[in-house]
Structures are given as structure tokens and as C-alpha cells.
Image: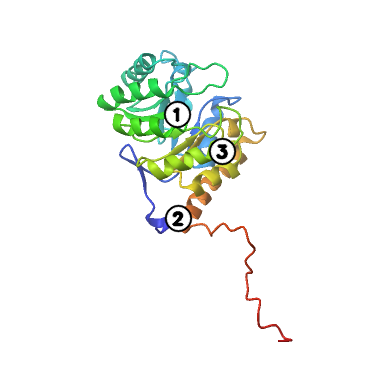
Amino acid sequence: MDSQEDKFILGGRELKSRLFIGSGKYSDDRLIPSIAEHSGAEVITVALRRIDFESKTDNVLIHIPETMQLLPNTSGARTAEEAIRLARLSKAAGCGNWIKVEIISDAKYLLPDGYETVKATEILAKEGFVVLPYISPDLMVARSLVDAGASAVMPLGAPIGTNRGLKTKELIRILIEEISLPIIVDAGIGAPSHAVEAMEMGAAACLLNTAIASSPQPLVMAEAFGQAVAAGRKAFLAGLGVDQTIAQASSPLTGFLHE
């Protein structure tokens, strides 16, 4: 497929950038518009627990460009019931119908609960939400999410905030091969090279936050990630060369002058 014909439509919206960014951990929320501009990202996730809907000044939402697609997340929810309640509050408060279902009861590694995630996804999808569930890359859970009405599946590359890259690479590859929905790699991506690798594998998009927010130069890093995601996608569309264990000469080994 020509890259000019490569359209990414999610939740009824066509997106030019396949980089999704987070809104947490910045030294100052006023950096967010510049981060968005430098990265080219059009989707931004925000933890609902960070939003003070009553405040008109101390509210992260006022720093998010209106052109961006808001992706509220249910970070902090430990059960399906809590996630559903947060999603409904978000919609009622005017945050739209996109929701990243994030249900975590594990305090050490912050791994998502797949079973509760499926339960919440099924209910929210029936209520008209565009549901993007965050999961460990488990094929059975992903298949259940397809049946539950998810709009995409968001497997982790490594535990949240670790910047350790694609530690679950082979499991993500299986999801890309077996799941018909877009696979958006979330969590663990700590360097542009990690994003390139995910996109070269065929991921539909990448979501990250810590790698940009913790960089000494977040604006430069945001730009680097925007370019990395685009380059990885282009490489995937072009098709990578065959991986071989035996050397293959780039030019013929015959026809030397002395022959």
C-alpha cells in the first residue's frame, strides 16, 4: 500500500498521526500544547482523576488544544464497576465518548486486569463509547475484547513508566497477526527506536508519555517520537527485507578482473 493511501480511522475519525501522547508527568501542564505541536500527535489521553471539573484555572483540560481528540482514561480504577462509573462521569462532563479502559489492582507492577477490562468494555461499548482497553498482551483477552465491542486493543510493551521498550514483543506480534482491530502499543516505550520497532511490526499506533515527559528536552523528544512513528509505519508499508543467518553478498561474487 502506498503511504499516501494509508488511512488510519479510529472511532469514526481519520487521524494523520499514529502517535498518541499522554498528559501526565510534565513539570508544567502549559507545556502540553507545544508537546502536541512538536510531536504532531492528534490524540491525547488524560487521567480522569487528574481533572478538577469545578476549577476553571487548575484544570489540565484547558491546556489541551481543541483540535486534539481527547482520550480520557480510567486510571485508578480497580474494578469494572469503578471504570464504568468514571467513563460515565467523563461523558456527562463533556469529555466525549472516547474512553481508555485502564483497570489495575496490582500495586507493584501496575499490570492491567484483563477480566475486569473485558467486563467494562462490553458494557461501555453497548452504551456507545469508543472503547480502547489497555491490557497485557494476552490473545484470549484480546479476542474477548473484540467480541465485547472494543474499537482497538492496547497491549503494554513493558510495565507503565519503565521506559524498558518492547519486552512483550513476541506476544504483541501475535496480537497483530490474530486480532482484526487496530493494535496500539501502550506503556513501556522509552526511546524512539522502540516506537520504530513497534510500528515496523505492524502496530497501528503507539501511545507514550513518560519517555517524553522525563526527557531533559521534552519538545525535541516529542518531535523525535513523531518522526519515529511515521518512519516505522512507512517501513512496515514498504516491507522489511528477509532476516537471514548466513551472509548474502550485495553484489555478485563472480566476474573479478583476474577471472
Give the residue type at disc 1.
Answer: Ile
Q: Horizontally, is 255 left or right of 22 in the view? A: right
Disc nearer the start of the sequence (2/3): 3
Percent of width and height locating residue 61: 45, 24
- Around disc 2, counting alpha carbons within 10 Å, would you say few (fewer than 14), some (14 to 19), or many (20 or more)? some
How far separated are the C-alphas under marks 2 and 1?
Answer: 26 Å
Q: Position of residue 225 (x, y in %)?
A: 56, 42
In the displayed structure, does residue 98 sit left or right of residue 184? Answer: left
User: Mark 2 or mark 1: which comes first in sequence?
Assistant: 1
Observer-nearest of 219 and 102: 102
Residue indicated by mark 2: 237
Q: Decide: marks 2, 3 in contact (CB < 8 A)?
A: no
Q: Position of residue 108 (x, y in %)?
A: 57, 18
Q: Which residue is mark 1?
A: 135
Image quadrant holding the N terminus, namely bottom left
Q: Is residue 22 above or below residue 15?
A: above
User: Residue sitting at 47 percent across and 43 percent down?
Assistant: 173
* Above or below for 13 versus 122: below
Q: Is residue 112 in view?
A: yes
- Residue at 48%, 57% in the rendered image: 239
Closest to the observer: 120 or 27? 120
Q: Which residue is mark 3?
A: 166
Residue 41: % across, % down: 47, 39
Q: Residue at x 54, y 47 (%)?
A: 227
Quadrant position of the C terminus in the picture: bottom right
Q: Earlier in the sequence, mark 1 or mark 3?
A: 1
Q: Amino acid at mark 2?
A: Leu
> Along the horizontal axis of the image, is 10 left or right of 158?
left
The amino acid pointed to by label 3 is Leu
Residue at disc 3, secondary structure? loop
